[in-house]
Image (tube, rainbow, N blue to C red):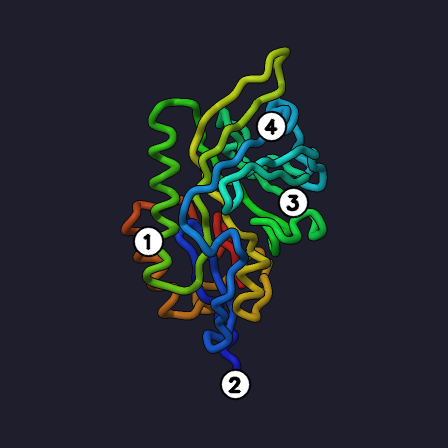
Amino acid sequence: MTINKELLLLSVVGFLLSTPVFSQKSDLTTLFQSTSPVEVQLGFLMKDVKKITDETIYTGTILSYKNDQGTWDSLIVDLRARGNFRRNNCFFPPIRLKMKKRDTAETLFSGNKNLKLVLPCQTAKTADDLILKEYIAYKLYEIVTPYVFNTRMVNLTLIDQSGRQPKSYEIKGFFMEDDGLVAKRFDAKMVKDVQLHPMRMQDTTSTIHDFFAFMISNTDWSSTGQHNIKVM
């Protein structure tokens, strides 16, 4: 059997794949098997976290969440700010979470070593509306293609511990699975070429992606330059 090694355009705000379609798997981690929002509490020194640009430096903290039984549970996590524009221009930085297998065993987060936590940019009342629109875009994309990042809505109590008195914010956000899990689901691997010629993309998947991006007025991506795009 000849394996198709063309690159497939995968996700709404950016995912490309180089994977044989016939190897698709449906197994998801527990976190992404439900669409109901997760109640989460997370506290850290926001000002300090935003200043750290070294992607290898993480800050340790406790993530508290309501489990399926409706009671609060917690686990140790490491986090760092991610992104460039939002880190410099937003009040809430987007977050990457890292957790150890032994800490997540038999919890809601079992099977996840890395997670992205997408947050609103600002504290305005309309900020939650924008994050909900972004979340809906991911869910809509699931209807037209299997090549997606799975997501889970979060009702987040974020506690900024930077000042003398911690300040609490009630905001919407969503967890996004790590690209490594998506690659594993399709028996694929990540590609990190700096430049990708459009002719290397799988045609049908690329067309679906491009039309979907057009439909939601998403212009902030580039497949050839891998801007807001991941490639498998």
* Disc 2 + disc 3, Cβ < 8 Å: no
Against 62, is 124 above or below?
Answer: above
- Mark 4 or mark 1, whichever is nearer to me: 4
* Residue named by callout 4: 43
Residue type at the position of mark 3: Lys
Image location of residue 128, percent across then percent down = 38, 31
Q: For mark 1, does the 10 Å Cα neighbourhood hold few (<14), some (14 to 19), or many (20 or more) residues?
A: few
Residue that label 1 marks: 140
Considering depth in this image, is 205 or 99 the residue closer to the camera? Answer: 99
Identify which residue, 8 or 71, lies in the foreground.
Answer: 71
Q: Which amino acid does label 2 sit on?
A: Thr
Q: Which of marks 3 and 1 is nearer the N terminus?
A: 3
- Frontmost of labels 2 and 3 is 3
Q: Which of marks 1 and 2 is nearer the N terminus?
A: 2
Q: Identity of the amino acid at label 1?
A: Leu
Regarding residue 29, the answer to whether it shows in the image is yes
Residue 180: % across, % down: 59, 58
| Residue ID for mark 3 | 98
Q: Residue at x 44, y 62 (%)?
A: 147
Q: Distance between the residues labelled 2 and 3?
A: 37 Å
Residue that numbered label 2 is attached to: 2
As helix, strand or loop, the secondary structure at mark 3 comes to: strand
**Do residues under tags 3 and 1 come within 8 Å of each other at their CB atoms?**
no
**Residue at the far top in the pictured view:** 164
Q: For the residue labelled by badge 4, is the local secondary structure a helix, a strand or a loop? A: strand
Q: In this view, does 198 lie above or below 108?
A: below
